[in-house]
Image (cartoon, rainbow, N blue to C red):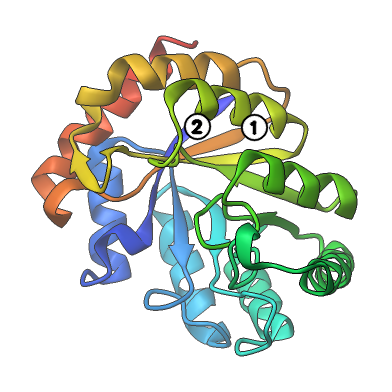
């Protein structure tokens, strides 16, 4: 089942209440709350407050979008505590600070060991962990992402997916299929190179992505991110497009 949502860091300058109001008005179903501004790492009181506001508005919390990168600049224990206070079922983390081309075998082994550690910690708290699928980390290529997930091989460590602009459409589809056994949620946007476009312009691509995602068992959130010009009007247009796209899969 595919459900709709928004990644809160799309609108960092807005308050949680303003974001909740926008999501309700847009008829999206959920919010992935970011750990840098809206629900800061370690601020459990804020997390509880935002969780209550979200629930009271009839929205789901799809995930806690943390900025944990395995270097303990942000301790994972603090991230996990905040996610639990937020009632988030999943924590998004970044696969380190090095792209796969720059990572030697020592770095790989460190990442694999640390990934096992945080997956174990989160499992005890009833929270899943998932990697961001992103450039400049160990999920920046299809081969690297697949190696990372395969070698960790932990039932509580999964992966997001998003269409990297450095990949062709065929490469994106192949990457999506390859990580499907680990897939949790997806980030939805339409970029050409580094330029943001309305989601409507990516309709054909996203129909293909969602057709693949619809084959997967369980519940998955498709959350808007990177709205053109950070414009609320564009957000509402993109939300309408996302809802229409998901209807084509029902």
Q: Secondary structure at mark 2?
A: strand
* x and y, in percent, of residue 65 in the image: 52, 63
Q: Which comes sooner in the sequence, label 2 or label 1?
A: 2
Q: Secondary structure at mark 1?
A: loop
Dot label at residue 250: none
* x and y, in percent, of residue 77 in the image: 74, 83
Total count of labels: 2
Q: Judge whether 80 appears above or below 142 on screen.
A: below
**Quarter where residue 243 is shown:** top left
* x and y, in percent, of residue 102 in the image: 62, 67
Q: Judge whether 110 appears above or below 232 on screen.
A: below
The crowd level at tag 1 (other Cα within 10 Å; few <14, some 14-19, many 20+) is few
Give the camera-side residue of 250 and 223: 223
**Quadrant showing the N terminus:** top right
Q: Which residue is mark 1?
A: 219
Describe residue 244's horizontal placement relative to residue 179 as left or right.
Answer: left
The crowd level at tag 2 (other Cα within 10 Å; few <14, some 14-19, many 20+) is some
Alpha-carbon span between mark 2 and mark 1: 7 Å
Describe residue 94's horizontal placement relative to residue 230 as left or right.
Answer: right
Describe residue 11's horizontal placement relative to residue 233 as left or right.
Answer: right
Give the camera-side residue of 165 and 207: 165
Which residue is located at x 13 percent, y 41 percent?
A: 234
Q: Which residue is mark 2?
A: 3
Do the residues bearing badges 2 and 1 touch, measured as CB atoms within 8 Å? yes
Give the camera-side residue of 167 and 216: 167
Give the camera-side residue of 212 and 14: 212
* x and y, in percent, of residue 46 in the image: 47, 81
Which residue is located at x 70 percent, y 41 percent?
A: 143
Q: Is residue 154 visible?
A: no
Which residue is located at x 29 percent, y 45 percent?
A: 24
């Amino acid at each position: 089942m595919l459900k709709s949502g928004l990644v809160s860091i799309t609108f960092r300058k807005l308050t949680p209440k303003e974001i909740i109001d926008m999501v309700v008005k847009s008829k999206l179903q959920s919010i992935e709350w970011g750990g840098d501004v809206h629900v800061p790492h370690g601020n459990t009181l804020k997390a509880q407050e935002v969780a209550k506001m979200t629930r009271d508005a009839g929205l789901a919390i799809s995930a806690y979008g943390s900025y944990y990168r395995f270097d303990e600049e942000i301790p994972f224990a603090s991230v996990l505590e905040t996610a639990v206070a937020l009632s988030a079922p999943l924590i998004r983390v970044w696969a380190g600070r090095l792209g796969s081309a720059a990572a030697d075998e020592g770095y790989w082994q460190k990442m694999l060991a640390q990934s096992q550690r945080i997956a174990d910690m989160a499992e005890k708290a009833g929270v899943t962990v998932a990697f961001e699928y992103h450039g400049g980390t160990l999920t920046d290529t299809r081969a690297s992402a697949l190696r990372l997930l395969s070698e960790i091989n932990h039932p509580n460590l999964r992966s997001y997916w998003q269409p990297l602009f450095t990949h062709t459409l065929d490469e994106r589809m192949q990457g999506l299929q390859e990580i499907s056994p680990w897939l949790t949620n997806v980030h939805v946007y339409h970029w050409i190179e580094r330029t943001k476009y309305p989601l409507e312009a990516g309709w054909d691509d996203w129909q293909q992505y969602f057709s693949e995602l619809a084959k997967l068992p369980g519940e998955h959130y498709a959350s808007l991110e990177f709205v053109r010009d950070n414009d609320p009007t564009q957000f509402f247009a993109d939300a309408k497009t996302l809802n229409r796209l998901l209807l084509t899969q029902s």
